[in-house]
Image: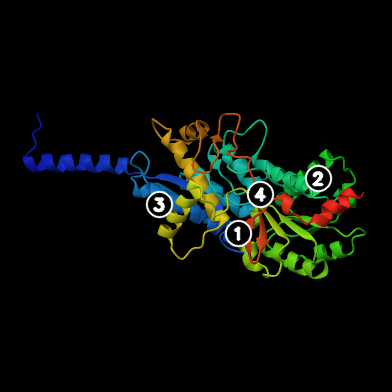
Amino acid sequence: MITLNLKQWVVSIALLLNVSLSLAVEPIRLGMTAVLTGPAATLGNDMRTGIESYFRLVNEQGGVQGRALEFIVHDDGYEPERAAQNMRKLIDDMKVLAILGNVGTPTAIVTVPIAQEKKTLLFGAFSGGGVLRSQPVNRYIINYRPSYAEETTEMINGLILSGIKPKEIAFFTQRDGYGDAAYQGAINALGEHGFKNVDLLVHGRYTRNTLNVEDAVAAFLDAPITPKAVIMAGGYAPSAKFIELLNQELPNIWFLNVSFVGSHSLQDALSNDIENVVVMQVVPNIKSSLPVVSEYLVALRAFDSSLEANAVSLEGFIIAKIFHQGLLQIKGDITKESIIDGVESLNGIDIGLGLDIYFNKLEHQAIHKLWLTKLNSGFFEDFSWQMMPDENIKEKKHE
């Protein structure tokens, strides 16, 4: 029979408590691969800020099931090869349970297959690309935002409603999966309006992670029919350069950007005297009185008072909040699979957006609503198609 003296009992109990506590506080590891350096770095850093500012709130309140949320972020420079390497490192080496907020469509083209292969959730990617929206839905890919097809369809419908003819619409896109997704969405929308001669429309392109937009500008200036509006799917830096150059020659043309451009970054890069710039948004205006916006502004100030609020970090905050709500649905162990089940069970909840979010095994996109904004005196403000210039409508009536 083995006997222990008082000191040995104390040591043994302490060791058992230490093991128990270490197991209880093991963090919930989550990952992200995004562009943190290079011409599009602001997008990745803002998404990261939004997510981390929300996770900080959760951790200050005790985490989830007593476990802190640990967010591990790797830079991919907006390059697919690096994004793939990061995904494998995060999942295989860092043992993350889910990936959140990855930035970009060209990177998604390689990260989506890895998420499926590794059976690890990729949630709330900052991309409207179709690769993230397969039918039937991919169990391991769940989105927050509307697709680029939805964004460009809204643009086409709005422009035609405003009296601009299909033949007066042109395109400026990044030469990769991102640009292709936006362009194809717009072309499909034009087809719904009976316009089939898409080869006649100007389409200027540029290479990702460059500012080489001069050829695209030249294509517009050489066009047999001067465009009245250009649908844009580019990064904020090349898009700003394109707008500045083309506006000098065609001051009345409208520039319509998909949400990925990052309205605040585009705003900072443009001259204050350019106002015919529209950006689609997948989040409310940061001046909105909606509860989630107010919550975000408070969290952002607490996280880093030097940071300015913007649509991209708000999106990061929103996807983190939705993800957290999914975690709260889990009654047992938090695993890769139970996280997905938890998110899919979010059916009919309003996180403060003023609209309900519905997920299930067949619906993997939280919202389909879009908000329109237009540059006005150096700032993006709420916009509607009814605010387009009257001359377009008058011209349509006299056809």
Q: Residues within 10 Å of mark 1 (few under 14, many from 20)?
A: many
2 or 3: tag closer to the N-terminus: 3
In the picture of the structure, the residue carrying the numbered disc 2 is 187
| Distance in Å between CA atoms under marks 4 and 2 | 18 Å
Q: Is residue 311 left or right of residue 171?
A: left
Q: Is residue 248 left or right of residue 55?
A: right
| Distance in Å between CA atoms under marks 4 and 3 | 28 Å
Residue type marked 4: Thr
Task: Give the numbered dot on residue 56.
Answer: 3
Residue 5: quarter of image: top left
* Quarter of the image that includes the N terminus: top left
Residue type marked 2: Ile
Give the number of the mark in front: 4 or 3: 3
Mark 3, secondary structure of its residue: helix
In the picture of the structure, the residue carrying the numbered disc 4 is 105
4 or 3: tag closer to the N-terminus: 3
Residue type marked 3: Arg
- In the depicted view, which residue is nearer to us: 45 or 171? 171
Q: Residue at x 77, y 69 (%)?
A: 245
In the picture of the structure, the residue carrying the numbered disc 1 is 77
Mark 2, secondary structure of its residue: helix
In x, y percent, where is residue 52? 45, 53
- In the depicted view, which residue is nearer to us: 152 or 165? 165
| Distance in Å between CA atoms under marks 1 and 2 | 30 Å
Give the number of the mark in front: 1 or 4: 4
1 or 4: tag closer to the N-terminus: 1
Residue type marked 1: Gly
Q: Residues within 10 Å of mark 3 (few under 14, many from 20)?
A: some
1 or 2: tag closer to the N-terminus: 1
Q: Residue at x 57, y 54 (%)?
A: 312
- In the depicted view, which residue is nearer to us: 390 or 264? 390
